[in-house]
Image: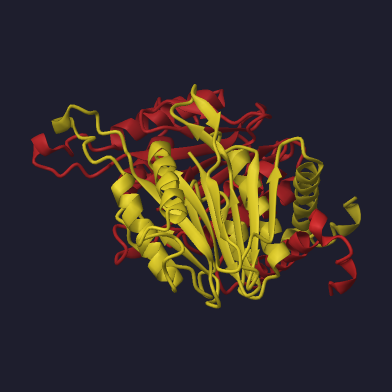
Chain colours: A red, B yellow
Amino acid sequence: MTYCVGIEVDEGLVFAADTRTNASLDDVRVHRKLHEFEFPGQAVFVLMAAGNLATTQLLVSRLRRDAEEQRPESLVGYRYLFEVAEYVGRVLVDSQVKSNTPEHGHDGVNTQATLILGGQVGNERPGLYMIYPLGNAIAASPETPFLQIGESKYGKPILDRIIRSHTRLDDAARTAVVSLDSTVRSNLSVGLPFDLVLLRAGDLHITQRMRLAADSPLYADIHGNWSRRLEQAVAALPRFPWESGDHDQRS
Amino acid sequence: MTYCVGIEVDEGLVFAADTRTNASLDDVRVHRKLHEFEFPGQAVFVLMAAGNLATTQLLVSRLRRDAEEQRPESLVGYRYLFEVAEYVGRVLVDSQVKSNTPEHGHDGVNTQATLILGGQVGNERPGLYMIYPLGNAIAASPETPFLQIGESKYGKPILDRIIRSHTRLDDAARTAVVSLDSTVRSNLSVGLPFDLVLLRAGDLHITQRMRLAADSPLYADIHGNWSRRLEQAVAALPRFPWESGDHDQRS
């Protein structure tokens, strides 16, 4: 499976993705699910994908080719991000094998993929879209400042509680790492290393990129620090009525 | 839907359940999903149920009748908790309507239910079981000190991080409330009020019971306190390498 989260705050965009893919429990590999497309001074995009790996690899190859050959339809051919999302949606639909049904002699393997696309075109404000297998898309908004694909449930509560439009970009990135870390603990099919990318509004290039592996000191630091602080937070929660007078006994 | 969690720590057992049931999004009601069975000085049980409401109500009615009439098979007829779990499993299987298939002229409504049963029989250690629709059961253990039924994913990370066998009973209860609160925020089909029950090992009766409603001051206090502390915890996480020298700028 997969877990990817994209966050849109006033300062810019955060993208975080795990790297584990599995055909089954005994066929687990590491594949990059976060892809960068930089056109310095012009536009910058980050694409994250959940779903069929053949589909998403074909999609990314086609997007790169279209841009490199400066085809009429390409990542650099549009003035608005929503148009880029429409274009990527069309390429996604074309990249999903359709003849995967029993009538075609196949076993109905799911070739669909779902995407998160974010970035900035020229002077437009940065934006964040979720693109569905049908090619249509929805945008993040101040009320819904993050989008998730894949195994999204375990990592959602922390995002719900923390992420607001005014959250600082680096704090949003830290929250994304915690959200991924929570998911890794609970679902075997989501795994380290994590890819993390920050796009500061107006930069028109990747502001920061980082890969967090299980043995990287920063990851261990975040992981341990978070667990400790959660324990403290639980211990400091309000007492139940029957605990009155019990305070002195607590260490 | 439903979300219930049972926790087994050295000091005893915690049970927490929401109370929302829905036939569809426009047919939402409040029903108790946590049921107490006290036989003071002899045994005490708590049962939580997720799944078909008709099934679980029939099950609970039958369990109460069997105990009241002192039938050969009843909650007070066994020396070991695993035998009680077997008995409850049999009653569960009998309470699930089987003629719900198209062949019987029905539309295949799911009449299954899944249970969490915990309690203590005489001097035996308290125990906690998950009982499946087939009537078979698994027990909690020091390595897996909590069991969840229903919409379990949103509330799992906090339990994974906090609950250990040595966790204090009241802290386990606070964690359960946070786990439910996280789920309510993310899934409309899980709702307040919450039922919370504590069984201290050896008590052989309900040690504490509490209903937490949206407007109860303790709930508001836990909810607000938790959100605040999570924000502080995120803000206090280790900095990224590119933030060095940035410390002074933070409020």
Does B184 sit left or right of B240 as displayed?
left
Does A180 sit left or right of B98 as displayed?
right
The answer to which of A67 and A180 lies nearer the viewer is A180
Q: Quadrant of residue A188?
A: bottom left
- In the image, residue B155 sits, relative to residue A132, either above or below, namely below
> Residue A187, position in %: x, y?
46, 59
Numbered label tally: 0
> Residue A111, position in %: x, y?
28, 42
Does A60 sit left or right of A240 as displayed?
left
Residue A33 appears anywhere in the view = no
Q: Quadrant of residue A22?
A: bottom left
> Residue B121, position in %: x, y?
51, 70
> Residue A106, position in %: x, y?
13, 43
The answer to which of A66 and A171 lies nearer the viewer is A171
Residue B156 appears anywhere in the view = yes
Q: Residue furthest front?
A: B69
Q: Name the residue at 38% across, 41% down.
A: B55
Does B24 sit left or right of A139 as displayed?
left
Q: Name the residue at 46% across, 50% down.
A: B64
Q: Quadrant of the C terminus of chain A?
A: bottom right
